[in-house]
Structures are given as structure tokens and as C-alpha cells.
Image: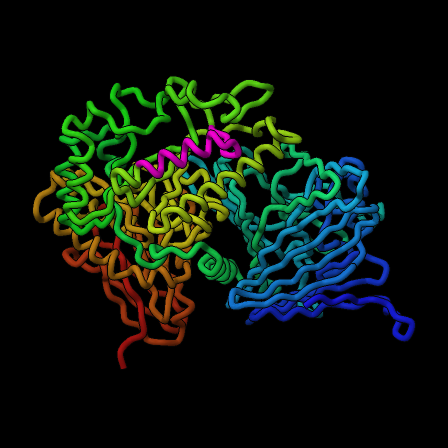
Amino acid sequence: MVFSLTESSETPIPESQSIDWNAGRLSLTVEIPRNGAPFLRSAVADGGPNMEMSAGLPLVDVLLLSIGHSPASNRLVHGSIGDSLRYLEHELQSDETGETLLLRCSTGVDGLRLTASYFVAAGTTVIRSMTRIENTDVDAEFIVQTLPSWSAYLGRPEGASADPRSWELVSGVNDWLAEGRWERRPLDGFLLPDLAASLTGHNPRGSISVTSDGTWSTGTTLPVGVVESKVFGAAWGWQIEHNGAWRWELGEDAADVYLALSGPTDIDHQFTRVLRSGERFESVPVAIALGTDVESVIGELTRYRRAVRRNHADNTAMPVIYNDYMNTLNGDPSTELLLPLIAAAAEVGAEIFCIDAGWYDDGGDWWNSVGDWTPSQVRFPGGFEEVVDAITDAGMVVGLWLEPEVVGVRSPAAERLPRDAFLSRHGQRIVEHERYLLDLRHPAARAHVDAVVDRLVGRYGVGYFKLDYNVTPGAGPDRYADSVGSGLLEVNRAHLAWLDSVLDRHPGLVLENCASGAMRSDFAILSRLQVQSTSDQQDPLRYPPIVASAPMVMLPEQAASWAYPQPEMDEEAAVFALVTGLLGRFFLSGYLNRMSSQQITVVAEAVTVAKELRTHIATATPAWPLGLPEWDDPAVALALVAEGRTVVGIWDRQGDSAVQLHLPRHVGRPIAVSTLFPAGLPAWEHHWNPETGILSIANAAPGPAARLISIGPASA
């Protein structure tokens, strides 16, 4: 339904009107001044305070080369156009997936219009936000430098005074083998210094800005964050849903602290987009959650991620995956080495067997020769079908490692494909670590990768691909683009369209997202694919913080953390490694074929527990009974909560430790605590204090150990 707050001769428009939008568990008020830009006036979520915002920050904005900031700054907000926005009309839409508000505005520039799109997924307090810009002028061209997807003040509860220093920022960084390292920082005088801005009459010009560039969207920093105020009892969480360059920022105005989210920008990513007559351009989608604390907003984002992701049969089935790579074959498979592993994986109950890197290599130096993706005749002298048949005969689905977006510099495909099928700058193909990168905007590049996937699925019955991506092209290509940043954005969107097309053609195919572990674990990709590798970390003692922090960014049922028990491990060490995989998608490796019958029994027990937990994991929200882990914490814990039951993984990385698990959901009630895994080792001693909600639990073993426990209401 379309609405327009128009002036009539009988009823003149007052100084301001508002759109009161009740979208399920979230209510928003957008104020529309008579002679000013629309802005978010208030927001309230179920169970939280009514957050009120000051005037002064338009809901939508755009930076053009010809019309920039006022005053000058590098911020995402306070563009001159934003101040000139005027409401035109709004539209409300509703269906079973959620509620949508479209807000259309003029810009004060002839022929240029902005539309803000807000979607609230059913059953959540999460807003998915995008901005669209349109050029209806028959003569003019506009050069877009930045098109933010969201900008609004954080607000404060009704009746409270603005207190920027009450907010704390929870943000994360990523690195290869050290993913998901989170820290909490107050928005104090260092991050937001007191500039006595009232004396100048202007807002500050700086901000707390976090960016990522290239195609490793999570390669250094994370597009997910939370700000929490214990004073206000409120928290905002966000995620930028883009598989390329992005920026989020927090800044202080005289009125309040604002949050702004964006895809690529000119200042950070060399992005400009020429908007010609009749053209429109959309920003990348972002999601914003309102709650009371960190766990509540991550819980809302978890529900939202489930609600809007692609519908796969695998979403709740969650078959157990065995992969031959980690701490096992390490990219050196052969018929001789694989057949015993296949038999052992089937014996413990694996349902997918993935042959990792190297299956296409005849010479042993395959890094810069990949691209044709045909099985090696040297590694598989009896034919690749011998290994494939062994997997299927054992009742498992065939999986293959594939890095489809790259072509090695020595690959015949590098010369066979046209040069403009590769990413290039200044007429030269971009090379990174001896690989060219395919440009999936080009028909020949698309035809090549489609033919590879279709051939492997059709000939060998592959039902699972581990899609890796170990290089990144930097700022982007300049071919077919207004700028390198614009070229990269188009390549990112072409990549998503390709993934969609693969799954449309092969709806039963399971795709794992891997990029040197989790260097590309953004929700743009995760909304499409079923599985996300959490790391390439090979040391089981260093893995627990990665496991525990993964649900900040991805769904628990997508998070595949390596469980790689080895025959030389004692039982406590093997259990430690196996617990690592049990609070997500169970991702098994290790030389199972060399294990004793007793060791195999322990692994099979873990697989059985993983299968029993699938329904719980696929409906649970995460909690952190010891707080979000720091990299060197001696003890780490992750809880998954669903329907009154809490499943907790606890890793004691030093030994002989006692910890206090904070379980606020169970305060005031008796509980029952049981060990889910392992059954053959002593249960850890525990004591429950219902008044404080603290479960004290102790590991008496002298070295590192882990347990998976279940907590529920005690029987009457």
C-alpha cells in the first residue's frame, strides 16, 4: 500500500509528521519534518527500552563527486544531499516472510531520487536495509562516490539524557589460523574524544571506522559488530551482507552517537559509479538488530540468518562430513591412501567423504597449474571411478575440493580462455600467488566454471563441493567498470549470481564456503551456501576460541570446525579434538584407518552424538557462559540454547582447572547436568547455585581436556 503525506487546501501539513511502523516484534517511528530530511525518531523491540533519537541525521544519504559533505569530512554521513532530502511517499508491504517499508525521497537535485528499503524478517527484531538511487534526468550524469545502506543515531531510553560514553563496542578481527578474535572497548575519550564541538557549532569530523577490501571480505576485520549500553539496557548489532569491500563506522555528533554501514566507498576502495540517465544503483544489503545486550542481538541475528537464507534440505539434515586434508593427507591424495580412509570414515558413520586438494595433479606441484580440474591418472592409476565407487558403495556422498574462480599461470586454461575472461587492470591480467582470477561477468569465464561443475556432478556424481578461494585481487579490475571499486562490486555480484545458478541447476548439491579457512565468511555468501569452514588451524589447542566465536558471524549449523583425532593421541587429547567439531557441522579428519578398535569406538561415539544434536543445533541460539573468548584464555566455553535445553562445550586448555559458567536462563530453578560426550571418561565435578545462575565445574585431569555437557530442568 502506497501512502503520500501531501498537503491539501483543507488540511495543511504540520511542522512534522511521522510513520509509525509496527513490524512484528519491532516498532519504528520515522519522523518527517515539513522542511527537513526524514530521520529515525524511535525504535523499540520486544523486552527492550524505547530508544529515542534526536533530529539531525537523515535516514538516507549519498555522496556525489559534484556534491560532497557539509562540513568536509571522510564520514559516511552528513552529505550535503542528505540535508536536502524531502519525503515524497512511502509504501508498506507484508507477506509471510516479514514486513517492508519503502521510503522515497527527492534530493534537491533535479532527476535524482533516493529510496530507503527496510525489511523486518518475521519473528525477529532485525532490519535488512538497502538504499537505491535513481537518475531520471534525460541529460545529467551523476558520479556516485558512496551510497550508505544505513545511518541512524543509537538513541537513548525515553527520558534519559544522551550519554555517548555509556556505549561499549564489541568488534572482531580475522586472520588466517586466528579467526574470530573479539574485543570489548568503551566509547571513551580515546575512541570518541570530547572536542568541545559546541564552541564551533559543528559536529566532529572523525569516526571509528572499520573497513575491508578486496574479495576476502573477512580477511582482516569482520563486517559484524555490536554496541551495548549496560546503563541503557540496550544494544545494537549489525552485519554487512557483502562478499567484497565494505565499511562500518561509529561517530559522535552533538546530538548522539550514530551507526553507519556501507559497501565500497571512494575514500577507502577507489569506488565511483557513473549514474547515467535512466539508470539506478543499489547499495549492498545490511542487517541491524535491536536488543538488550550482546547475546540478545546475536540471538536475533541468528534467527534472522535462518529466516532469510536459501532453503536447502541440508539446512537441518546436516550430514557428517569426512575430509582427508587437515593433519592427514594435506593435499596429497591417491587411490592407495584414500581407500583405507574411505572404509574407516564409513565405519564411524560419516555421510559425506570429501577428497580435498591434489586430486587433479599429476606432477606434485599443482598450485600454479590448476584450472582444468580433471582427475590425475598418476594418483589414480585404476581410474578416478575406483575411488568414487568406493565412496558411494560405502553409502557416502562424494565430495571434491574445488577452487573454481582461479586459473594457475601454467594451466592450459590460462591460454585457452580469452584474456578478457580474467580480472585485469590497465590491460594486464591480475596475478596473485601465481594465479589468474576469472571474471565471472564474462560469458567465457561463466561457461568454463559451469562446465567444470556440471561435468564433475554428471560424471562422478559429486554431491558436495568444498569451494576454496586462496587469493584476492586487491582493489579490483578496471575493465568494464567506471572504477576499480565499481568493477570489484560487479564481480562480487556476478559471483553471487553464479552460486545461485549452480544451486538452481543442482538443488541437491551441498556447497562449503572456504577461503583459506574463513577469509570470506560474509552473509552474502552464507545466505546461499550450506557450510562454512571456520579455520585452517592445525593445532587442536588453538582451535577452541575460533569455535566459540564462530556463531557471532555464522549459523551454528553452518560452522564446520575440524575434529582431527589421531592414533598417537591419548583418549583425553582425542576427545578434546572431537569436542571441537560437535557444536556445529561435524567436520571430521584424521588417520582413522590407523586407529585401534577402542579409538575408533570413541570417534564413532562422537559421530553418533553429532547426529543426535543436529535438531538442537539447527534451532539453537548461542551464548557464552565464560564471555566471548580471548585468544589465550585458559578455558573456553560455548553454549547453544534451544527449548529450555543448553548444550555447552568446555575446553580446559591447561588442565586441572575450575570455571564458573554463567547461565542466566536457568536462574532460580533446579537443573540436571549430564555429560553428552565422552561416555568413557570421568564426568567433571560440578555445583549449581540457582540464586546466582552459576554452574561451577572442575576438570581434575592434569592436562588439556574437554567435555560436552547438557543442562536442562531437573526432574520433579
Q: Is residue 398 magenta?
A: no
Say which residue appears at 37% left-offset and 26% top-offset: 371
Residue 469 location in percent, x, y? Answer: 41, 34
Q: Decide: is 283 above or below 119.
A: above
Q: Is the magenta stretch mostly helix, strand or loop?
A: helix
Say which residue appears at 78% left-offset and 59% top-offset: 88
Q: Quadrant of the C terminus?
A: bottom left
Q: How is the image coloured?
A: rainbow
Residue 36 location in percent, x, y? Answer: 83, 57
Residue 587 location in percent, x, y? Answer: 28, 46
Q: Could you say which is closer to the camera, residue 440 or residue 308? A: 440
Residue 438 location in percent, x, y? Answer: 47, 29
Is residue 537 among the parts visible in the rendering?
yes
Say which residue appears at 50% left-offset and 47% top-offset: 524
Q: Could you say which is closer to the camera, residue 186 or residue 472? A: 472
Q: Decide: is 353 above or below 438.
A: below
Q: Write the start and end of the magenta stretch as one range.
A: 438-455
